[in-house]
Image (spheres, rainbow, N blue to C red):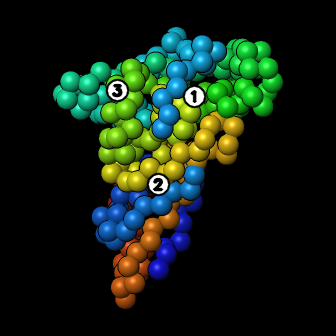
């Protein structure tokens, strides 16, 4: 039995609804959407480091992960976060020049209108040790690595404690659907009489209680 998807809309409502569905139903989260290569010079950007300008939910998730990593003795920091349109445009133009064509460049860098960094919904992290830690533990905070060829790139792609969607090979592929850009949640529930109705009622009550829309 599959509960209908909760479509894009208010991000916090999707987070709350996702948490509620997992708590009430114990379902399995499914979202549509390792190599450790060195980032090409054309893609590196340090001027946008830190959480300034990021989506607040993403910023809080990263800071929580960073604190936990630090307690385990693992260094973790943002090497590139929110980027301006102009910064991303420069990266894009540099990428096209260095890789020889737009199609080749798209494996590593996207134009401003397509970049999650410009909207504040993506972070690049370092060092490699910290990125590996975040890949292993990031789902606890809703953070997921999204591209197979970019060990440093993470986005909010699941609810905290959920399951990360499969990575796509690189940025030229259709991006995995993420909560931050209007993703859908699909919950597979056991076939228990009345369970679907209970979950639907709980979602409605949660939305009313917290005035979510």
- Vertical side of 210 occupied by 23: above or below: below
Sequence-first disc among 1 and 3? 1
Furthest residue in direction right, as rendered: 101
For label 1, the residue is: 117
For label 2, the residue is: 14
Disc 2 packing (10 Å; few <14; some 14–19; many ≥20):
many
Which labelled disc corresponds to residue 130?
A: 3
- Vertical side of 129 occupied by 60: above or below: below
User: Which percent across, then down, holds residue 87?
Assistant: 64, 15
User: Which percent across, then down, holds residue 207?
Assistant: 41, 61
Alpha carbon distance from label 2 to label 1: 21 Å
Sequence-first disc among 2 and 1? 2
Q: Is residue 99 left or right of residue 57?
A: right
Alpha carbon distance from label 1 to label 3: 20 Å
Residue 170 vs residue 31, the one in the foreground: 170
> Image point 32% across, 41% down: which residue?
137
> Image point 67% across, 31% down: which residue?
107
């Amino acid at each position: 039995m599959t509960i209908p998807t909760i479509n894009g809309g208010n991000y916090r409502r999707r987070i709350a609804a996702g948490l509620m569905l997992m708590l009430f139903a114990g379902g399995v989260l499914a979202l549509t959407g390792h190599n450790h290569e060195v980032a090409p010079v054309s893609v590196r950007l340090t001027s946008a480091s830190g959480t300034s300008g990021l989506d607040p939910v993403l910023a809080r998730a990263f800071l929580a992960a960073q604190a936990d990593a630090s307690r385990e003795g693992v260094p973790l920091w943002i090497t590139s976060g929110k980027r301006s349109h102009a910064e991303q445009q420069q990266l894009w133009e540099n990428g096209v020049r260095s890789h020889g064509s737009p199609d080749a460049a798209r494996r590593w860098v996207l134009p401003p209108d397509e970049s999650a960094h410009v909207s504040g919904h993506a972070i690049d992290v370092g060092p490699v040790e910290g990125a590996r830690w975040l890949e292993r533990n990031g789902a606890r905070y809703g953070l997921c690595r999204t591209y197979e060829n970019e060990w440093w790139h993470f986005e909010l792609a699941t609810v905290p404690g959920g399951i990360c969607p499969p990575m796509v090979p690189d940025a030229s592929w259709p991006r995995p659907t993420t909560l931050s850009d209007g993703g859908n949640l699909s919950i597979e529930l056991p076939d228990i009489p009345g369970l679907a109705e209970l979950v639907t009622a709980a979602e409605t009550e949660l939305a009313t209680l917290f005035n979510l829309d």
